[in-house]
Amino acid sequence: MFVGASDRMEMQKVPQAGYTIKGLWISGLQRSLSFKNLLFPFKLLSSLWASRKIIKSFRPDIAIGTGGYASAPLLKMASLRGIPCLIQEQNSQAGITNAWLGKDVQSICTAYDTMDRFFPANKIHLTGNPVRQDLLNVKGNSSEAHSFFKLSAKAKTILVLGGSLGAKKINELIDAHLPYFNTNQIQVIWQCGKIYARGYQNRIQQNIQVHPFIQRMDLAYGAADVIISRAGALSVSELCLVGKPVIFIPSPNVAEDHQTKNALSISQHNAAILLHEKDAQKQFKSIIEDLLNNTEKQKQLGTAILALAKPNATKDIADQIEKLISHTHR
């Protein structure tokens, strides 16, 4: 049984995947003064009541939260009924919901170390984030990848990722540097996002590919010499597994600035380059030029980020869940 916020994407995505989901009337507090904040106490009470009814009728063996708005009322009611609870914190900066639930749950699966800043140390298990298993072999699919994207294996290739919706500032950055890529015969696989596709479709050239969305991410990673990406939790976990040199340009417009903190946790290990969005237009050319011309640095970054990968995250989280269930049913 999945439980989500009634106005969020999960209400469509979960049924599409073939699972049942219940919606709660819940949302986060707005950072600015807003009428929506006046509704928050009513939404919370409504969601706590609905969560109580869901738990009573479904009778779960365990409740699992991943930090979304719906996690708070659901896991709070589950813990009050003595149901074992586990949360998975994907980011290096704990979200408000998970930090609040930390004292109530039995187990906390994290993707980064030093998370005892936010949670009781005895509950923490460093598992990593679940990632697609088809990324385990991207270095071995280079030939297939170049063929699939119709690229030359002799030219350098940059993969640009802004998330499924795209990233406005990253798109503007790439657009501004198209003359540089052309002059230096650099190939670009540019995932611009669905909402920006129409505006950048006319930028397609022999060496510049523009994609609203990339279906075969395993082959896109396999073709890339350098990857430019946002620093969302799952993107960072995937890129660790891929083991290619990465330039992170985190979005500054997210809660607790968690993307910058995610990127910083990797760059502090000399395993990626952190480029702040505000500095990107000024600094990008010198950074990408230096990286593309320095094969030793590419190798060092790729090796270092791969060392941070947690390829068994899904299994390790599932093991923690099974332990909690079996301990409860003894």
Image (cartoon, rainbow, N blue to C red):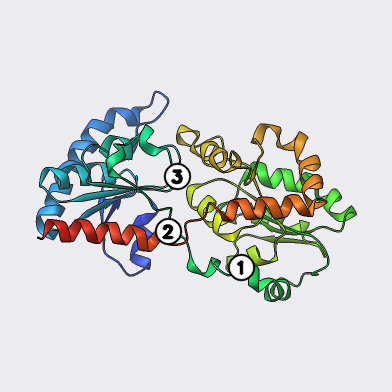
Kindly identify the amino acid type of the residue bearing the numbered disc 1: Val
Q: Is residue 303 left or right of residue 237?
A: right
Q: CA distance from mark 2 to mark 3?
A: 13 Å
Of the residues under marks 2 and 3, which one precedes in the sequence? 3
Q: Residue furthest top?
A: 33
| Amino acid found under the numbered disc labelled 3 | Tyr
> What x and y, as percent, mark residue 294?
80, 50
Query: What numbered label is drawn on residue 112?
Result: 3
Q: Quadrant of the N terminus?
A: bottom left
Question: Quick check: can you spot residue 110?
Answer: yes
Q: Which residue is mark 1?
A: 138
- Report the residue marked by disc 2: 130
| Dot 1 or dot 3, earlier in sequence | 3
Which one is in front, 223 or 20? 223
Q: Let me know if residue 1 appears in the view.
A: no
**Residue in front for this viewpoint, 217 or 5:** 217
Residue 261: percent from the left, percent from the top? 52, 37
Q: Residues within 10 Å of mark 3 (few under 14, many from 20)?
A: many
Circle 2: element type: loop
Q: Are marks 2 and 3 in contact (CB under 8 Å)?
A: no
Q: Quadrant of residue 176?
A: top right
Q: Compare marks 2 and 1 and give the one earlier in the sequence.
A: 2
Could you tell me how many numbered marks the image carries? 3
Circles 2 and 1: CB atoms closer than 8 Å? no
Tag 2: amino acid: Pro
Q: Which mark is residue 198?
A: none
- Give coordinates of residue 185: x percent, y percent: 86, 58
